[in-house]
Image (tube, rainbow, N blue to C red):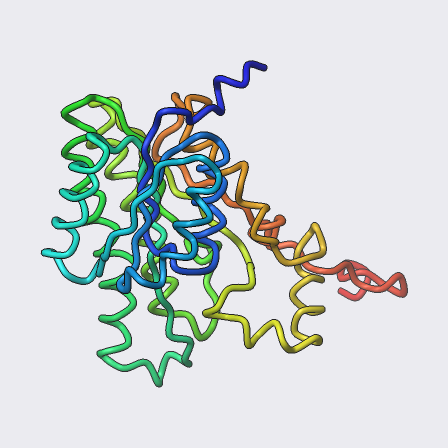
Amino acid sequence: MSGELFDLGGQVAIVTGTSRGLGQYMARALAKAGADLVLTSRDRNRLLPFEAEIKALGRRVISLELDVRQRESIEKMSANAEAAFGRIDILVNNAGCNVRKPALEVTWEDWNLILDTNLRGSFFVSQSVARGMIARRYGRIINIGSVTSVAGYAGLAPYGASRGGIRQLTMSLADDWGKYGVTVNCLAPGWFRTEQNKVLYEDKEWVAYLSDRIPLKRPGQPQDLDAAVVFLAAESSRYITGQTLLVDGGISTGATRALAASGSAGEKQ
């Protein structure tokens, strides 16, 4: 198969939320595939070491401040990115947050923080960047969802609502903008260790329990997302839009460990 299907040479990508974590891994994968990058964070100074790393790969890169909860910040970032590179071909809506609490303890402020960041922010960043894509009749928008886009977990009510909303938003925008040559898809990771959830992974028993529920028997590693994000950004996905691509080791199948050989559920009935 031709490498041109996965070549991002000459293209420009914005990846939001790249001061740490999975955002950096996805941005790095796009850069290695040939894309120039716009990195964003609420604190631009936190991006400078990663910016230097991307420059060392031979890519053009700029770092811009972005607070996805502020409309003015979104519009300023989008305008500055367009001014710097002349166009934006790829947008990865990665910026997000979470507050892990039992549902009865979630506050009004918790809900607003999570939904405003994960869902409203993704919509208005997409809207702002898509104006240029629509004018040029080409674009790739990748919204970052989660296995919680398709499954519910205790303690994650607002987060799951925001990620479920991302899946629905993806389908709506795909229908809206497909006629302009803009594809919109959702990349939904399963259980990956991040700064937001690293405390969970310090519990070896919990990790063993989680791994037992995953058909591939391990949590995700950051590099497991590389091929998926490049695929959705590249020519290879030209006829795919409105879809949710789960990269979750199979946990969304709902599979559970088989019962011991002493008897099956059917035998006990």
**What quarter of the picture does the C terminus occupy?**
bottom right
Q: Identify whether 57 is placed above or below 136.
A: below
Q: Position of residue 199 (x, y in %)?
A: 55, 77
- Residue at 47% in and 34% down: 230
Q: Residue furthest left?
A: 72
Q: Please give the name of the residue rendered at 47% of the width and 42% of the height, measured from the top-left corner.
A: 56
Q: Position of residue 226 (x, y in %)?
A: 53, 41
Point out residue 81 in the picture as x, y percentages from the top left corner.
21, 41
Q: Quadrant of the N terminus?
A: top right
Q: Which quadrant of the view contains residue 3?
A: top right
The percent position of residue 224, horizontal first and vertical second, equals 59, 46
Nearest the eye: 47 or 196: 47
At a point 22% along the width and 49% down the height, the residue shown is: 123
Q: Is residue 218 left or right of residue 147?
A: right
Q: Is residue 256 left or right of residue 172?
A: right
Above or below 262: residue 173: above
Q: Taking 17 as reference, is 197 left or right?
A: right
